Amino acid sequence: MESQGRSHQRRERIDIIASWSRSGILEERRRLLIEEQFAERVARTRSLFFVPLPLQYSDDLWYNTQVSFLMEAFDALPRRPDIAFDSVWKVLEKSSVAWLPTPPDGRINITKALGNLSAEPLLSGPIAETVLGSIPSQTCVFLFKRLVTQEPAGSSDKARKRLLQGYSTGDPLPVEIKNFLTLVEEKYGDPAPETARRGSMLLRRALSGESLDIAGTPVALSFSARLRILLCGLLYTARNERFHGESFSPFYSSAATIKTYTHPHYLFLAAYALTHLTWVHSGRSHALPLDAIEENTVTNFREARKLYAHHWTG
């Protein structure tokens, strides 16, 4: 039955393109079943889905370039939160690079920028904690595969390398994260589905800041370790897999369900909140007050949970 579903979806994708080949792409294509179900859910729950913050006016070219990508992200919603994440990531990347002093050659590596940003204590507080404490189960599964069972191998190797390398002299986070992952691997490295599920949920608890006991060893990840896992292990990995075409475009898959939407939706919300947080602490004139960003972050995650209900945490 599952094989028939995959075969039907593959044929449907080809048929849609064939239809466009006859009429051109100005004619809106028919929606796939999961897209219909998602649209119906959005309408039925009356969720606001996402509420952007009102922005300050400025003639600054850098700022207006970032606003253009935010607009691009918003235009993709609600149907394509994955594309919205791609667009808002560009803003977060530029904001992260702008955080560091410009070296003589004028080039700042994004990996180094994110690594340094994750060690910044200024980012700690209610906004980041809301982001870290709101991870849906689908995202935890994604992260568990990349960091613990290490699949797919290529992407996982790069993700772990970003987490286990230092970004400054005496950087303590690689050792802290390595010790944590070693404990998780020893207890939950068995690829059995139930073991992997428990391991994924443990990652959620760890990233939310909960004090844990893993096989008799007490563990409580520091804020900076949690933020580095979020920035360098999750968001950057998801971005790279999409950018390099290493992951299946999510909503064209025969395996897509409502839960499939939770992962890119979370990535988008996390990148959006962190972008505004970096603007505040960069001292930019267009930055909004922290309390406004905090309220907006809470609102957007509340609306997401309202929309997805048990699909978010189940």
Image: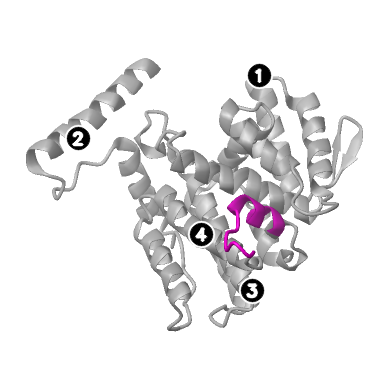
Q: Position of residue 248 (x, y in %)?
A: 42, 33
Q: Amino acid at mark 3?
A: Ser
Under tag 1, what secondary structure? loop
Looking at the figure, which quarter contains the C terminus? top right
Q: Which mark is residue 192?
A: 1
Q: Earlier in the sequence, mark 2 or mark 4?
A: 2
The Cα–Cα distance between marks 1 and 3, rounded to whole angstroms, is 45 Å
The Cα–Cα distance between marks 2 and 4, rounded to whole angstroms, is 32 Å
- Mark 1 is surrounded, within 10 Å at the Cα level, by few (under 14), some (14 to 19) or many (20 or more) other residues, namely few
Residue 49 in sight here? yes
- Kindly report which numbered mark, 1 or 2, lies closer to the viewer in this rendering: 2
Under tag 3, what secondary structure? loop
Q: Residue at x 87, y 29 (%)?
A: 215
Q: Position of residue 220 (x, y in %)?
A: 84, 47
The Cα–Cα distance between marks 1 and 2, rounded to whole angstroms, is 37 Å
Is the residue 253 above or below the residue 297 in the image? above
The Cα–Cα distance between marks 4 and 3, rounded to whole angstroms, is 28 Å
Q: Amino acid at mark 2?
A: Ile
Query: Pointer 3: what residue?
Result: 282
Query: Pointer 4: what residue?
Result: 303
- Kindly report which numbered mark, 1 or 3, lies closer to the viewer in this rendering: 3
Q: Position of residue 19 (x, y in %)?
A: 13, 36
- Kindly report which numbered mark, 3 or 2, lies closer to the viewer in this rendering: 3
- Locate residue 310 relative to residue 103 in the image: left or right: left
Residue 1 in sight here? no
Residues at marks 3 and 2 touching, judged by CB atoms closer than 8 Å: no
Q: Earlier in the sequence, mark 1 or mark 3?
A: 1
The Cα–Cα distance between marks 3 and 2, rounded to whole angstroms, is 46 Å
Q: Amino acid at mark 1?
A: Ala
- Kindly report which numbered mark, 4 or 1, lies closer to the viewer in this rendering: 1
Query: Pointer 2: what residue?
Result: 16
